[in-house]
Image (cartoon, helix red, strand yellow):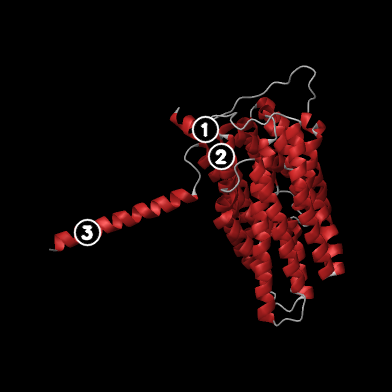
Amino acid sequence: MSITTDRVRSAQEGTSQAAGGRKLGRMLPPAGAPRDLAFAQLANSVGDGAFIVTSALFFTRVVGLSTAEVGLGLTIAWLVGFLTGVPLGNLADRRGARGIAIVLALTTAASVGSFLFVRSFALFLVAAIVYACSQTGLTAARQALLAGLVQPAERTRIRAFLQSTVNAGLAVGALLGGIALRFDTSAAYLTIFAVDALSFLIAAGLIRRVPSIAVSTRVKGEPRLAVLRDRPYAVLALLNAIMLLFMPLISLIGPLWIVTRTSAPSWVVASLMIVNTLGVTVFQVRIAKSVHNLHTATRSVRYAGIAMLAACAVFALSAAKLNATTAAAVLVVAAALLTLGEMKLASGAWEISFGLAPADKQGQYQGFFGTGPAIARMLGPALLTTVVLGWGPIGWILVGALFLGTSCATGPAVRWAVRTRAVNEDATPSLVEENAA
């Protein structure tokens, strides 16, 4: 009798483990190149999360720079990184996306590692420029690698897996950074930066496992950087950059609004990032399933504009005379709506950026489209601080209207772009065919 019971229990445990394995499998991209890219992104994002949380104090307390020097240095660095995105993406097209991605992951690791020894503004600036350029170029090279390895119909879904992985890694990295902040010692900060450098070395090793893709050759008489002459694509990149102004809303404007204009407790500031990070980690893949061509992509961007307008309206409402608990609840709802808008925007933007780029120029096109975050980070803080914090609830409504108007303009811009090029949805082999080979 006991033997039978043990067998039944063993079978139930096996079934439970198999179900758990299937659930885990659904949370990961397909095995092979997509999963290796996801794990490389995970390694990067853990390091980036720790870097974001600790960098300001590291540069001032360990490196010994003033806050003005840190701000100036990073602004210059990201401006240079913004300018090098397209040339580095073009280099990935011409020399091989995998090889360039590996090199840029290594140079990122070297630049982060150099921060451990830099103790002057001049050397900090050099290291920061190398870091920013490497990060920008690495993003373009990885996007080109993804475009070359994944069937067009699958790119947005796989990119959603990667984004979900990034957010999970950022959360883990932020936790590690928080531990370093708790100790608040030079040794703790140095350890975090060493971990960040190591994360990019690990990423380089994981990218090395990915198959290489074909390189392209420039046709005689063709412009070296064709994307700079592609006006419809440039307009779409600009519209995407405007939509990406939601990024400073989460990281800077929202927290300042909470502590200066609402009755909510200060801990609600942390809830914005928690809701955003967990939301993208859990729901990004599910949201992206509805996007599978340019038509559904433009619809997703339009829904993003509606969600962001609603979020801004709820943020404006939080300035009313509410008790602390109600204000906190209202702000969590606003963060959730903004996160929904982010996921809808990302799903549509990935499909548009890949689908309208020539197959042999994905590197430079992704490098150009990928300048949106840099533009949002450079211009967003000053613009949004003036409009939102200066004008109050009316400022929130104006920002929401900007999001909605920009999202509605994306559809006509996509149709204009389609009329100027051939859009081939079946240009690359499927993952099933690639893995079978």
Q: Amino acid at mark 3?
A: Val
Residues at marks 2 and 3, CA–CA distance in whole angstroms = 41 Å
Going from N to C along the chain, the mark reached first, 3 or 1, is 3
Quarter of the image for the N terminus: give it. bottom left
Which image quarter: residue 55? bottom right
Q: Can I make out residue 58 in this image?
A: no
Badge 2: residue crowd in 10 Å (few <14, some 14–19, many ≥20): some
The residue pinned by badge 2 equals: 154
The residue pinned by badge 3 equals: 8
Left or right: residue 337 compared with residue 70: left
The residue positioned 69% from the left and 46% from the top of the image is: 298
Going from N to C along the chain, the mark reached first, 2 or 3, is 3
Left or right: residue 379 compared with residue 211: right
The residue pinned by badge 1 equals: 430
User: Where residue 182 sits: x, y (%)?
Assistant: 62, 67
Single out the mark in the foreground, 3 or 1.
1
Compared with 49, 224 (above or below) is above
Query: Looking at the image, do the residues carrying marks 3 and 1 touch, with CB atoms under 8 Å apart?
Result: no
Residues at marks 2 and 1, CA–CA distance in whole angstroms = 8 Å
Query: Looking at the image, do the residues carrying marks 2 and 1 touch, with CB atoms under 8 Å apart?
Result: yes
Q: Amino acid at mark 2?
A: Glu
